[in-house]
Image (cartoon, rainbow, N blue to C red):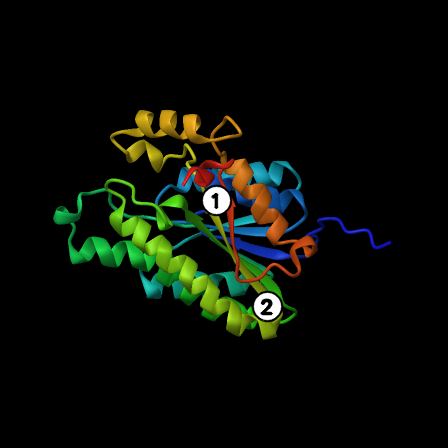
Amino acid sequence: MRKIKIDLQGKVALVTGGSRGIGKAVALRLAEQGAEVVINYVRHRGHADATVAAIKAGGGQCLALKANLADESSLTAMMAELRRHHDRLDILISNAASGVLRPVLELTSHHWDWAVNVNARALLLLTQQAAPLMTGGGRIVAISSIGSVRAIPGYTVVGASKGALESLVRHLAVELGPRGININTVRAGVVDTDALKKFPNREEILAGSMARTPLGRLTTPEDVADVTLFLCSELAAMVHGQTVVVDGGYAVHG
């Protein structure tokens, strides 16, 4: 009988948007299992430093790199800096997300470009640079949201960009599979992160989500991190090109 455990010793992982919320939870989970973690952040250096300190306090290794993933040159510079510290990359978590919350008739092409570039295009650019470093195979996980398949007031450009992200993962799976690189999406339900605090109807969203969730509680960043960790492990060796929903059953209500 083959015994399988989640052991990421010797693995190098990059988590974009890894200083707060879901990204931080994922970074901590990967580090707990032995991975050397690189987190990306764009504005909140203090949060990034706190995440690095938490990982190091637990005996792990972590490096924080600043980059605006909407800017291709900034993303490229971040990957060059990563290569100065590591000659390989085993895990890529595309988690960084951004966008505005506005009615459709108030949206501009700038709002569209910003959301799509951060939430979807960045995965394409990151994959193009990460794949050559995954010489022994690897794992890529994109973090999406329920807004990719459901209409949420004010969420138009973010939801559309997340839909593009999920489609991109399926297309990348066809080309990355032969290289031994698994790629999947984790679609999170309603998670009470800093991003949700920007919604004017936050309390209504939280109450409604709680009432609609069969398991009786909101999804936490740690819930998303646990499933992400699974997809990065050998336990998920034949999970490829899929979207795994983590929402406590919220979506089954239709």
User: Amino acid under label 2?
Assistant: Met
Q: 167 or 90, which is in the foreground? A: 167
Is 243 situated above or below 155? Answer: below
Is 30 situated above or below 91? Answer: above
Picture disc at residue 134: 2
Q: 50 or 251, which is in the foreground? A: 251
Whether residue 216 sits left or right of residue 113 in the image: it is: right
* Residue depicted at x 24% and y 45%: 100
> Which quarter of the rendering shows the C terminus?
top left
Does residue 69 appear in this view? no
Asked where in the image residue 195 lies, by quadrant, the reply is: top left
Q: Which residue is mark 1?
A: 23
Q: Position of residue 69 (x, y in %)?
A: 36, 57
Residue at mark 2 to residue at mark 1: CA–CA distance = 21 Å
* Residue depicted at x 66% and y 60%: 237
- In the image, farthest residue toward the left: 105
Q: Secondary structure at mark 1?
A: helix
Whether residue 177 sits left or right of residue 234 in the image: it is: left
User: Amino acid under label 1?
Assistant: Gly
Whether residue 240 sits left or right of residue 203 in the image: it is: right
Q: Position of residue 130 (x, y in %)?
A: 51, 66
- In the image, farthest residue toward the right: 1
Is 40 situated above or below 89? Answer: above
Q: Secondary structure at mark 2?
A: loop
CB-based contact (under 8 Å), mark 2 and mark 1: no
